[in-house]
Each structure stands twice: as C-alpha cells, then as structure tokens.
Amino acid sequence: MNRKVLSGLSVVLISLFIMSCSKDNGSPTIKFIAGQEFTGKDTVMLVADTLPVTVEISWNGTDVLETLEVRLDDATMQSVTVNETKATFDINLIKGAAQSEKWSFVVIDKSDNQAQINITLTKDPNSIYGAVTYNQSVNMGAQANSTKHGFLSLQTNQYFTLDQAFTNQPLIDLIYYSNQSTQATLASPGSDIPDGLYPGYKDITTWTIRNITHFLKTNWSTQDFASISTDAPIIKGWTDLASQLKADNLAANQVWLFKLKSGKLGALLVSQIVAGDTGEIVFSVKMQE
C-alpha cells in the first residue's frame, strides 16, 4: 500500500517538475533599434516634440510572444497583441510637461515570461508652453434636434438655442448641423452655412456679428489626444494655411484642431455621432487657457 502511494506521489512530483521546467524556458528578448532620429539612449527633449522609437522583440525559442506593453512611469499606456515569434514596432513618444518621464517597453510571452527595456526623457529647459482647459463631454444637437442645443460658446462654456444665439451673437463659436453634403459638421457663424438651414429672420447668414472658427483635421489617435497636457502639441500641430472653415464628415475617434476668432487654439476628440438633422454629437475639448 505504501509503495503504491509513494509511486503515485512520485508520478505527481515528476509531472510537476516537468510542468515547471516546460514553463521556464527563459525570457524573451527586447531591444531598441537605433535610427536616424533615435539613438536608443536617454535624451533631452522639448515639450511636445516627438521621438520615434523602434523596438524589436524575439521569443525564447519555445513560448510565443503574447503582448507588448508601453508604460509611462510604470502606468500602462498601451498594450498590443503580438502572437508572433518575432516582431518590430515603431512607436512615437510625445514629450509631456513633466521634468522627467520613464518610458518602459515590456514584452510578455504565453508563459508569462517577461523582458523590459527603459528610456528616460528629460524636459529641455528651453521648452515653451501654456496650460490647457479640459471639457470632457460637450453634447450638441443638430438643427432639428428639439432637446439638444446646436450653438456653443467656448468663451463661456454655454449652450444656446437659435433664439438665444441670435441675441448673443458675439459669444457663438461653434454650430453643429447635418446635411447631405457634409454630413455631421461643426462650423461657426462665419462659415458658409447652407441656405435654408435656419430659416426666418434669425437665419445665421443675416447675423451682424459672425465669429469665424477655423478647423484642421489631424491623424492623431485617441491616445495622442489623451496625452495633451499643455498647449505645446496643439501649437506645433496647427497650420493656418491648411485650415478650413468647417469640420465636416465627422466620425468617432477623429481629432480636430481649431482656432477661435480670439486666436486661442484647441483640440477636440469626437466620441459619438448620432446621424441626421435630429441627431447629435459628443466630443471632448482641450483648449488654451
């Protein structure tokens, strides 16, 4: 009886030993690939400048790579699924306002083996930037929406109906509407507003004060928008010559820059669109103080 028990126990111990050995096959590898703009070493950067980083990851010969995590001061900013034995990633780091930032790149395989490399970005003392305000949720209605107002003042953070906007013309910075030509559209009173959109004597084309807001579409991601902590990236991204009088054909996750009549710059991230002239839009705004 004792011998059988011991034999059984031996089998269990041997199985556990084999399982343990099969899991510990060594760590994957990760390294920086130096390029024209990236040396692979700690560096000093101006706030809002971009550093293109290239990372190469490889498996341990047994365990397939599962994820690559990008961390800022140990907080995970992005996690990418890999499912390969080897891969190369190009990642753009944008310098924030902090004096020092530790960026970490962590590769994890199917057996939870990990490897990590770090780079420290230090703020250049010559950086020039200003603070931004953050409005996390702006909700405007299209021209036939009876419950959501379609006029907005970014000067006072107030919504207006058409009647209210008519008597507060100097305050109106944004208008939201939808039509067949430009679909979901953000504009301003000084834009080329379609005829008949707001009929009657309060039609925007008859206003005596028509503020103009300019817009510029970007290729920024939602993470790029989230990382805006000063006005430096907005200033850097803005180009007057490339701007337009409408932000048209809006869609979720788009990031647009804008410039008010006052000269203030901002960025907006579209989070939701309900189509049609009774629809609505929800977006976030970061703007110079």
Image (cartoon, grey):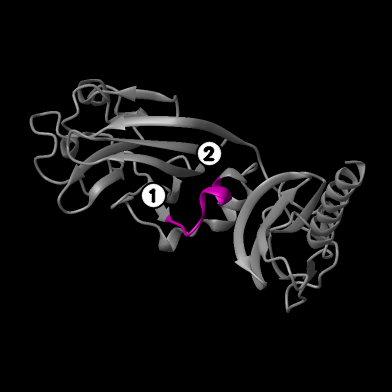
Left or right of residue 266, residue 93 in this image: right
Label of residue 287 in the image:
2
* Residue carrying label 1: 214
Residue 140, compared with residue 192, is above or below; it is: above
x and y, in percent, of residue 169 in the image:
29, 29
Which part of the image, by quadrant, shows the N terminus?
A: top right
Residue at 79% in and 58% down = 23
The foreground one among 72 and 110 is 110
Q: 166 left or right of 137?
A: left
Quarter occupied by the C terminus = top right
Q: Amino acid at mark 1?
A: His
Q: Residue at x 81, y 70 (%)?
A: 40
Local SS, label 1 = strand
* Residue under the point 36% across and 28% down: 171
Residues in magenta, as a range? 217-225
Of the two numbered discs 2 and 1 on the same chain, state the one appearing first in sequence. 1
Please, what secondary structure does the residue beneath circle 2 have?
Answer: strand
Foreground pick, 26 / 274 = 26
The amino acid sitting under disc 2 is Met
Is 246 left or right of 267, judged from the image as shown? left
Question: Label 2 to label 1, Cα distance in Å?
Answer: 14 Å
